Image (cartoon, rainbow, N blue to C red):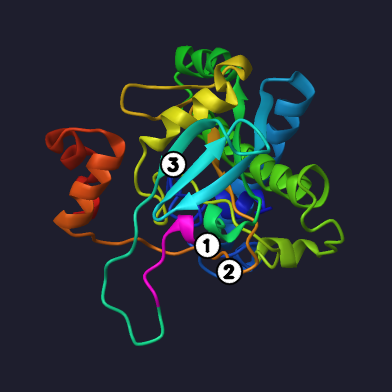
């Protein structure tokens, strides 16, 4: 799990504070150390207030489902015999030319096809650490305390990521238990030395956000207070969702740019008209 200082400085996608560096080294940096130490102290102080005052609630929903790959799709079933389809995840495949011996990857590659006779599974999860945040943010807005509001949002984001990491660890060692004997140090966990990955919709291996609709329906995410906006952003904002893939060779990758042929194929698999598909896939075309 990433330390707070890396989350609220350069390692954060929010880039709220322009302090690039790694924790704890940045605390002793000649140019940025003082600012980093002050920021770290403020973050730690607010974190204590979050815990003591129970400002935030964290909840999660997770499921391990029977699954099989069909080309670039992953079919999820309701039953262990794999007779009834629950939903179908339509993934994208890399199309950039590669050197001989290297293949163009797709997340479906890490799930066994039904034709192999192997009974594979896939995990889905959604976690949030942002329940209750609006009450405190309203207080800060009324007091015109933008700094505290931004700090609270940043900490909620980091807590959600930490929760997602802890849940993934429990899935690997307890709930799915495909790595029940895992014994890793905190440094090894940060370096992702464990087996399996947890890619998320909207990120390089799955740039399409529309898959969240089926994920949230199957996980019954509304029961824990999570939802999706019309643009498929998660609510509360401090939330993480994605897939668990246990294949020992599973690794993160970037789909990158795809051709019109794959876009048309994806639209057909989604039963989606071409114009809507173009909007969903615009960043990858």
Q: Is residue 113 visible?
A: no
Mark 1 / mark 3, whichever is N-terminal: 1
Image position of 131 with respect to 242: above or below: above
Q: Neighbour class for label 3 at 10 Å: few (<14), some, many (≥20)?
A: many
Frontmost of labels 2 and 3 is: 3
Q: Which sits in the foreground, 269 or 162?
A: 269
User: Residue 71 — which label?
Assistant: none
Residue 119 magenta-drawn?
no
Q: Residue at x 35, y 35 (%)?
A: 210
Q: For this view, does 173 lie left or right of residue 94? A: right
Q: Neighbour class for label 2 at 10 Å: few (<14), some, many (≥20)?
A: some
Image position of 103 with respect to 65: above or below: below
Provide the residue span drawn in magenta.
103-109
Residue annotated with mark 3: 89
Q: For this view, does 54 lie left or right of residue 100? A: right
Q: Locate residue 82: give its quadrant.
A: top right
Q: Neighbour class for label 1 at 10 Å: few (<14), some, many (≥20)?
A: some
Residue annotated with mark 1: 32
Q: Is residue 128 visible?
A: yes
Give percent across and percent down for residue 15. Answer: 42, 49
Q: Residue at x 40, y 56 (%)?
A: 71
Q: Locate residue 105: give its quadrant.
A: bottom left
Give percent across and percent down for residue 101. Answer: 41, 85
CA–CA distance in space, label 1 to label 2: 5 Å
Give percent across and percent down for residue 276. Answer: 18, 33
Q: For this view, does 14 lie left or right of residue 263? A: right
Q: Which sits in the foreground, 34 or 78?
A: 78
Mark 2 / mark 3, whichever is N-terminal: 2
């Amino acid at each position: 799990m990433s330390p707070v200082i890396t989350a609220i400085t350069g390692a954060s996608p929010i880039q709220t504070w322009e302090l690039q560096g790694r924790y704890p080294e940045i605390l002793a940096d000649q140019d940025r150390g003082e600012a980093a130490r002050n920021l770290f102290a403020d973050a730690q102080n607010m974190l204590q207030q979050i815990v003591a005052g129970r400002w935030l609630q964290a909840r999660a929903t997770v499921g391990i489902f029977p699954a099989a790959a069909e080309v670039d799709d992953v079919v999820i079933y309701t039953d262990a015999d794999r007779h009834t389809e629950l939903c179908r995840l339509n993934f994208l495949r890399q199309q950039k030319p590669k050197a001989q011996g290297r293949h163009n990857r797709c997340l479906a590659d890490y799930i066994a096809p039904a034709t192999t006779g192997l009974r594979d599974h896939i995990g889905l999860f959604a976690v949030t650490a942002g329940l209750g945040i609006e009450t405190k943010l309203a207080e800060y807005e009324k007091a015109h305390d933008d700094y505290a509001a931004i700090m609270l949002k940043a900490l909620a984001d980091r807590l959600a990521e930490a929760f997602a990491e802890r849940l993934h660890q429990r899935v690997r060692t307890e709930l799915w238990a495909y790595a029940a004997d895992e014994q890793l140090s905190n440094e090894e966990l940060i370096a992702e030395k464990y087996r399996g990955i947890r890619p998320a919709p909207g990120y390089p291996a799955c740039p399409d956000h529309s898959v969240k609709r089926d994920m949230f329906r199957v996980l019954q995410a509304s029961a824990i207070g999570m939802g999706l906006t019309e643009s498929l952003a998660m609510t509360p904002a401090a939330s993480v969702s994605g897939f668990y893939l246990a294949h020992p060779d599973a690794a993160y990758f970037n789909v990158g740019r795809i051709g019109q042929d794959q876009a048309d194929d994806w639209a057909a698999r989604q039963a989606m008209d071409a114009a809507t598909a173009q909007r969903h896939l615009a960043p990858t075309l």
